[in-house]
Image (spheres, rainbow, N blue to C red):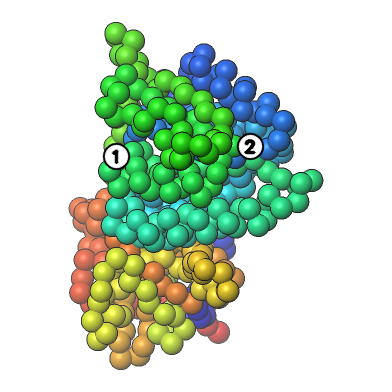
């Protein structure tokens, strides 16, 4: 993916997210005893954390991760919730190696993945097979790199989605059968109808299963009933994308409001990408051949590297997301905005278009005409901006 026409700004570390009012979790006694039990396991465990949506799986996983670090030094983390990811961007399934304690136990934090797949939607229900293939590919990557050498084996935490009924239950069963965890932690609430079945529900009758740990959701009402936590999932996804896009700019630039970020994104010199350098993959829809390039205009795309191998699942891995700001069909050029460093973009040969949308907070800014709202935005990209780095 050639991107030489853009003036490449100095890349700076990601700016920290806005501090939340609370970052420390109140750990119930059954959570504390379960974390102690798992972290004292004689061999590095493979732990799957499951339960209903918003039951506290991510919070428990953070606490467990911090407890495993002192003994193992590093902890592997498989982030499988495309709608409410822990470390990745919306629509992504990602694998991470964490070597430092998480300071914020109540809120997700954006971290660069060691390996990432762009699924392209906030729910797996649109294409369960593709979702599971991405997940299994990342688990295979973990096994191949971190479970083969007994002297360097790492523990793994798998944080699962909260869709535990219908097709979501079927996918969880497939996931558990494939991963074969050593420990399964199930978080339950008082309303039994929302819980997963008791026991090792994914196994046949005579199969030997993992160690099972049942804990109650941490949030209780006045009657001491464990409840689900209400979250603004849509708002969380938009804030995560905004946080990612702010990385396009040096940290000393003030972008405290959506309006400032919208103006900045509208003026930043984009990368210039020849059509011939990339292949377009539409993940969840079919597009007529004559409209493939135009269909990318004003969309978020996964910037991916094809993974050609003899394995049954040759899944492309994603290095980040970008906004296609404009298309010039006559010149055969795309104009892409992304904070992904130029050296990583050079390997990108796939643009994956899914259903992840540009945050509405960046489109609906009073006093700022967003370039992404226009059908043809090329006149907004001045020649001076495009070639500012030449000479």
256, above or below 25, in the image: below
Q: Please name the residue shown 38% across and 25% down the image.
A: 188
- Nearer-the-camera pick, 195 or 369: 195
**SS assignment at label 2:** loop
Identify which residue is drawn at 61% across, 31% down: 66
Looking at the rendering, which quadrant does residue 166 occupy?
Answer: top left
Nearest the eye: 280 or 52:
52
Count residues near mark 2 (Cα–Cα under 10 Å), then give few for <14, some for 14-19, many for 20+.
Answer: some
- Is residue 268 at least partly visible in the picture? no
Left or right: 11, with 205 as reference point: right
Q: Answer left or right for 179 relative to 379.
A: right
Is residue 43 visible in the rendered image? The answer is: yes
Q: Position of residue 199 (x, y in %)?
A: 44, 29
Residue that mark 1 sits on: 165
Crowd tier of the residue under label 1, counting other residues whose Cα lies within 10 Å: few below 14, some 14–19, many 20 or above: some
- Quarter assignment of residue 355: bottom left
Disc 1, disc 2: CB below 8 Å?
A: no
Counting residues from the start of the chain, the first of labels 1 and 2 encountered is 2
Q: Position of residue 267 (x, y in %)?
A: 36, 66
Judging by the rendered image, the residue that carries numbered circle 2 is 45
Q: Which residue is at a point 63% across and 37% down the rendered structure image?
A: 45
**Cα gap from disc 1 to disc 2, whole angstroms:** 27 Å
Q: Residue furthest top?
A: 223
């Amino acid at each position: 993916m050639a991107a030489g026409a853009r003036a490449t700004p100095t890349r700076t570390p990601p700016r920290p997210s806005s501090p939340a009012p609370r970052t420390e979790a109140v750990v119930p006694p059954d959570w504390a005893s379960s974390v102690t039990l798992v972290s004292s396991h004689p061999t590095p465990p493979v732990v799957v954390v499951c339960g209903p949506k918003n039951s506290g799986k991510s919070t428990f996983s953070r606490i467990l991760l911090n407890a495993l670090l002192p003994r193992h030094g590093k902890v592997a983390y498989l982030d499988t919730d495309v709608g409410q990811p822990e470390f990745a961007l919306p629509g992504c399934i990602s694998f991470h190696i964490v070597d430092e304690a998480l300071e914020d136990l109540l809120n997700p934090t954006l971290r660069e993945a060691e390996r990432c797949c762009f699924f392209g939607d906030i729910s797996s229900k649109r294409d369960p097979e593709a979702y599971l293939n991405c997940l299994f590919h990342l688990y295979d990557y973990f096994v191949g790199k971190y479970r083969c050498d007994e002297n360097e084996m790492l523990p793994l935490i798998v944080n699962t989605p909260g869709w535990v009924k219908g097709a979501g239950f079927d996918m969880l069963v497939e996931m558990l059968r494939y991963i074969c965890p050593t420990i399964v932690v199930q978080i339950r609430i008082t309303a039994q109808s929302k819980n997963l079945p008791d026991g090792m529900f994914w196994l046949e009758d005579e199969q030997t299963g993992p160690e099972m740990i049942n804990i109650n959701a941490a949030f209780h009402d006045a009657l001491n009933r464990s409840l689900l936590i209400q979250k603004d999932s849509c708002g969380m996804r938009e804030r995560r994308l905004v946080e990612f896009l702010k990385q396009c700019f040096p940290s000393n630039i003030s972008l405290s409001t959506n309006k400032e970020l919208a103006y900045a994104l509208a003026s930043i010199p984009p990368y210039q990408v020849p059509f011939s350098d990339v292949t377009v993959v539409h993940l969840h829809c079919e597009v007529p051949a004559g409209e493939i390039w135009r269909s990318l205009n004003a969309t978020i795309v996964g910037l991916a590297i094809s993974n050609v191998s003899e394995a049954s699942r040759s899944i492309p891995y994603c290095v980040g997301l970008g906004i296609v700001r404009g298309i010039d069909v006559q010149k055969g050029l795309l104009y892409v905005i992304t904070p992904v460093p130029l050296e990583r973009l050079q390997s990108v040969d796939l643009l994956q278009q899914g259903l992840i949308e540009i945050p509405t907070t960046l489109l609906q800014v009073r006093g700022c005409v967003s370039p992404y709202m226009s059908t043809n935005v090329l006149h907004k990209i001045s020649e001076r901006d495009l070639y500012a780095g030449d000479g």
